[in-house]
Amino acid sequence: MVPQPKRKHSQGRRDRRRANDALTSAKLVQCSNCGEMRLAHTVCGKCGYYRGKEAISVAAEAKKK
């Protein structure tokens, strides 16, 4: 026989448990310049382009590190 709960869980406890049910994965789009998958509305980390224009110089960023 399966054990049964002794007390009713409160609505707050129930809702806190269900709070993470609505989480979704990050939406990725393809970079128009290099084709790499990236987050929408962000600069491409591989080529440094955003909306068809070079936003950052990736070669210069690599030298800094």
Image (spheres, grey):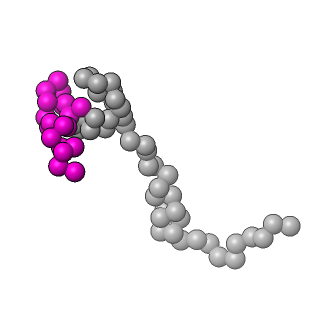
User: Where 65 sits versus 36, above or below?
Assistant: below
The residue sitting at 13% across, 27% down in the picture is 53
User: Where 39 sits versus 5, above or below?
Assistant: above
Q: Is residue 34 left or right of residue 15?
A: left
Q: Residue furthest right?
A: 1
Residue 41 shows up from this direction? no
The residue sitting at 25% across, 23% down in the picture is 33
The residue sitting at 34% across, 29% down in the picture is 36
The residue sitting at 81% across, 66% down in the picture is 2
- Give 19 or 12, whichever is nearer the viewer: 19
Q: Which residues are magenta?
A: 47-65
Q: Residue furthest front?
A: 63
- Give 36 or 4, whichever is nearer the viewer: 36
Location of residue 61 in the rendering, given as x and y in whole percent from the top left corner: 18, 43
Q: Is residue 9 left or right of residue 45?
A: right
Q: Is residue 15 left or right of residue 59?
A: right
Q: How many marks?
A: 0
Residue 63 falls in image quadrant: top left
Q: Is residue 26 left or right of residue 33?
A: right
Residue 49 falls in image quadrant: top left
Location of residue 56 in the rendering, given as x and y in whole percent from the top left corner: 14, 37
Residue 2 shows up from this direction? yes
Would you say residue 60 sits in the magenta stretch?
yes
Location of residue 1 in the rendering, given as x and y in whole percent from the top left corner: 86, 67
Would you say residue 62 sits in the magenta stretch?
yes
User: Where 4 sits versus 35, above or below?
Assistant: below
Q: Residue furthest bottom?
A: 6
Location of residue 23 in the rendering, given as x and y in whole percent from the top left corner: 44, 49
